[in-house]
Image: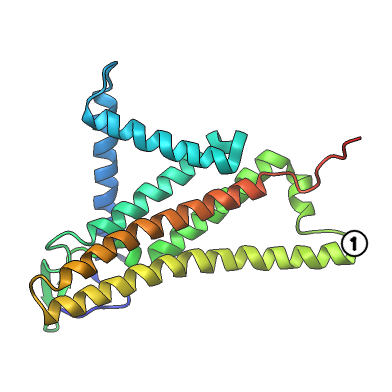
Amino acid sequence: MHSSFAAESVVQIGIFKVTNALINALFVDIIIIAICYLVAKNIKLIPGYLQNATELIIHSFYEMTESVAQEKAKIIFPFFMSFFIFILLSNWTALLPGVTSIGFFKDHELVPLMRGATSDLNTTLGLALVSIAATHIMSIRAVGVKDYLSRYISLNPINLFIGILEIISEITKVISLSFRLFGNIFAGEIVLFTVSGIFAFLFPIPFLTLEIIVGLVQALVFSMLTMAFMAILTTPHHQPDHA
């Protein structure tokens, strides 16, 4: 097996290539839908273990969102939680035994049927674009078109220059969010592949533990940055004067 920078194509349907990263993303989606279905189906007045765990996680993360976004938490939280769960499961499912070792041979190299979705730049770039697009749509709805545009356009030369810097900042957010997540997960995949190829037993365990932590941290970083961006851009640019 080799470690490819780009996600490998597993099957081609017409002009559309189904990559192993896409299969992992679909696998994660199925897990999320299944958990939601099980929780929704078994909601009880006296909760079971799954409902208890779900309520504890949701409540804890909602309080975190509320501490940052305050009254806007109810509109920001669904995005924050969705990004966190999807990225976390994408990162962790890539560490499951057999995920990167079960596949087929192509040109004398093993192509795995699945690889971590977040180890593919296409996935992380897509997540970053959705994050930024949702942030700006939410901003327009929260503060109005006039206040939104005033962040970037002004007749005042100084404010206009600041607005240009803001536009550049929004572009760099996409690059930062996508490459940070991709770089950390892909680098971890390379390290695990290299170490596991040299030492088959025991020695890779500390590296695997580290990747579990990295997967959690990167999911938190991406989702919390999204939350912070949404909280900032849904705050009016020009606050009303108080007497």
In this rendering, the answer to whether 50 lies above or below 105 is above
In this rendering, the answer to whether 94 lies above or below 224 is below
Where is residue 32 drawn, in percent x and y? Answer: 29, 42
Q: Quadrant of residue 145?
A: top right
The residue beneath circle 1 is 156
- Drawn side of residue 23 relative to residue 79, left or right: left
- How dense is the environment of label 1, judged by Cα within 10 Å: few (below 14), some, or many (20 and up)? few
User: Which residue sits at x=87%, y=40%?
Assistant: 241
Where is residue 85 drawn, in percent x and y? Answer: 36, 47
Quadrant location of the N terminus? Answer: bottom left
Q: Quadrant of residue 179?
A: bottom left
Using the rendered image of the protein, determine whether residue 11 is visible from the camera's viewpoint.
no
Where is residue 211 drawn, in percent x and y? Answer: 28, 65
Quadrant location of the C terminus? Answer: top right
User: Which residue sits at x=60%, y=37%?
Assistant: 70
- Drawn side of residue 192 relative to residue 171, left or right: left
